[in-house]
Amino acid sequence: MQGLKGKTVLVTGGANGIGLSICRRFAAAGCTVAIMDMDATAAEAAADELHRSGATALVAVADVSDYEQVRQAIAGLESDIDILVNNAGWDRFMPFVQTTPDLWHKVLGINLFGAMNTVHSVLPGMLARGQGRIIAIASDSGRVGATGEVSYSASKGGVIAMTKAVAREVATSGVTANVVCPGPTDTAMLSAVVNSSSKPDKLSDALLRAIPMRRLGKSDDVAGMVAFLASDEASFITGQVISVSGGLTMCG
């Protein structure tokens, strides 16, 4: 895809799962990849993998829910961020009446405030340079809701609204902001969510039956859409929400 080579991309939650696939895709396109993760060991391992492939990789260790940690980690990179991918997320599957305010705060802190913290930290530089790409990884649960994921749905709905609002606010500045909503994707996070339910086998079967293409998504399915939205081909696309879900959610 055009316009990616030589750019610096920051991927939050980039050490594993969808985030790592996104890092690999940008590395293959010739980008410098900055991996932000709270797991320093995993982030270093991901960076080593990218180095072995011939890419340039940086590590920024931070809890995205902590604004000062995010700002300091980004400043420590000593590199302008051309592309921001807000990927870090967390979920716990359970009926809403069994959840607690502590759980709500954790989910919202990571998923919503984490995205706000990173955008607030990198957007001034993008505006000053007159160019930038912001891509948020949300979820179809933020568009239509999901049983057992009330706080998660709320947080991802917030990510969608926040990213759209930023897109509108900076539309004349050369910065675009879009949202990718994966459907159920074969990752360790999905396995943890399914296994935390009272009937994991039943939940897994229900997920597959609900997807018209009758398979779980792959991390690479999401990475391809993210790379497209960051490329020159998508320069006239902003404020959009795109599902990568095998047809699970078909929003007009």
Image (cartoon, rainbow, N blue to C red):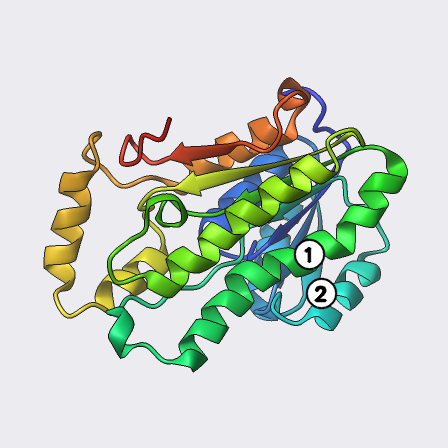
Q: Position of residue 154 (x, y in %)?
A: 42, 58
What crowding class fits label 1: few (fewer than 14 Cα within 10 Å), some (14-19), or many (20 or more)? many
Q: Secondary structure at mark 2?
A: helix
Q: Is residue 141 visible?
A: yes
Q: Which mark is residue 118?
A: 1
Q: Name the residue that disc number 2 marks.
A: 70
Q: Tell me if label 2 and label 1 are in contact, CB under 8 Å.
A: yes
In the image shown, does 182 or 102 lie closer to the viewer? 102
Q: Residue 77 location, x and y as percent?
A: 80, 57
Going 26% across and 75% down the picture, which residue do you hit?
A: 97
Instruction: Look at 46% across and 51% down and name the residue there.
Output: 157
Residue 250 percent location from the top left of the image:
31, 30
Horizontal placement of 101 versus 203: left or right?
Answer: right
Front position in the image: 64 or 41:
64
Closer to the chain start, of discs 2 and 1, is 2
**Residue at (37% x, 26% y) in the render:** 252
CA–CA distance between discs 2 and 1?
7 Å
Residue 98 occupies quadrant: bottom left
14 up-or-down from 252: above or below: below
